[in-house]
Image (cartoon, rainbow, N blue to C red):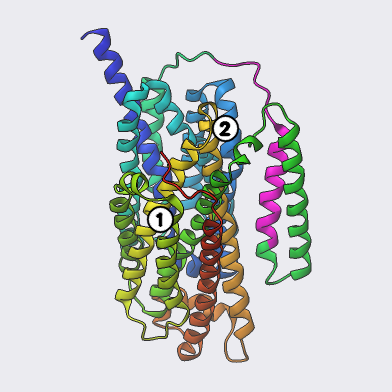
Amino acid sequence: MSQTNQVHNKRWVIMTAVFIATFMTSVEVTIVTTALPSIISELHGLAYQSWIMSAYLLTTAITTPIYGKMADTLGRRNIFLWGVIVFSLGSLLSGLSPSILFLILARSVQGIGAGAVMPLTFTIIADIFSFKERANVLALNNTAWGLSALVGPLIGGFLVDQLSWHWVFFVNVPLGIIVAILIWLGYHETIELNSKLVIDWLGILWLAVLLISLLLGIQALDTMPVFGTMLLVVAAVAGWLLIKQEHRFSDPLISPTMFKSKTFTIQILTATILSGVLIGYQMYFPIWLQSLYRVSATTAGLVVTSSSIMWLIASFFVGKLIAKFVPKQIAIALISLMLVSYVSLIFAGPTFPVWAFYVIAMINGMGMGIVVSMNTILSQHLVPNEMVGSATSVLTLGRSLGQTVMAGAYGAILNLVIRLQLHGNVTFSQVNSVISSKGAKVAVNQALIDPIILTALHMVFVGVVTMLVVVLLINVLDPNRRVIK
């Protein structure tokens, strides 16, 4: 075998690992949402249910920019291996969780690992493939995300129905071991490490304080409004200090220069807010269908799958649409369509047809597939070449932040509305038991509990509709009125 073939084969060993790692981290969101009702019911965790997602998303969001900087100092291979090992350990601990608080802690560990794995998959591809090869390789790797979105809900539903929710976490452990072995044996770095890199520790600190206090504040608003408001004030102060730090630091975590373009800023805000919309349907469509319609976890998961199929199909048309239409026209049209579909959920009664959820999910997938893909392409195109990596990092952080904050906000809305409706014959723990389709079959006061859950879900989607109205107005304000080339 020639040296060229050896290098070629080694690259594809690395790509196999990157592909599996992309699948492993992306499937984590879709597979867990299907199992949420069973986890909530068994661990009696309705009051903390949003933290199952939020803990993972929060630690991922905080650590993503940190690992990006560390990879330049310590090497991609070492940081990537660390991330895979930590993620796999978090998956194992999550599956072994005896309580809701232990599960939240284990999910935080998973997120710390994912914060290294997710951004470095793109960096490793850039390191080992030329610019001409990169587009095709990235497209190939993106199919791992598509595959996870398609099969994640099905795998999650099958594991919950046939085994138990614990297995939705265990399934990632062998995948993590495979990735670690492939990287250990097949990836040998040739890049020159930069030992003089100065890390923006104050920026990292204020970003962490901002995200943690923001999420805790949102969570606390329904039970401790004064404490929650104080935390939101802390978040606002931390945000202000972060902006000041990034303006004066020589190598900032998030460069303010990028945001001089209003159209770029709108792309970041749109992707951030739409990610908040995305987590709403991913978390609450399965809960709605399982608790009120008594369908299986597998059937409920298929709704999320239908959205993912449309996302994948629609993303193939982004290039042609951008070439012919002004970006704001594309965004306004699709966001308006999504808005109309979600408004119907606010008025949905107990006889609202199940097929309508599939239609709404498919409209959601089509809109997200085009608009979020467009946000990614434009955010990279609208900055200088030396900032493309930073722009991608900011977009990734924005999407994580959108999901993290809104997962907490939706959870607070759900719990607050449920508590406001409780009366003598119905307790919070009884409502908790109905959130699982299995528990719903034997629940006491079923006729009283169902309307409580339905009203709470209505209010969650009032939140979703509000987000869509905001993002629609933001795109209307986009100053760009020409096709971007």
Residue position for label 2: 67
**Does residue 203 belong to the magenta stretch?**
yes
Magenta range is: 193-217
Q: Is residue 317 left or right of residue 408?
A: left
Give the mark toward the camera: 2 or 1: 1
Q: Is residue 338 left or right of residue 86?
A: left
Question: Going 61% across and 68% down the picture, which residue do you hit?
Answer: 412
Secondary structure, magenta segment, majority class: helix
Quick one: SS at disc 2?
helix
The answer to whether residue 109 shows anywhere in this view is: no
Amino acid, disc 2: Tyr
Q: Is residue 427 above or below residue 26?
A: below
**Does residue 66 belong to the magenta stretch?**
no
Q: Quadrant of the N terminus?
A: top left
Residue position for label 1: 330
Q: Quadrant of the C terminus?
A: top left
For this rendering, which residue is in front, 473 or 482? 482
The answer to whether residue 465 shows anywhere in this view is: yes
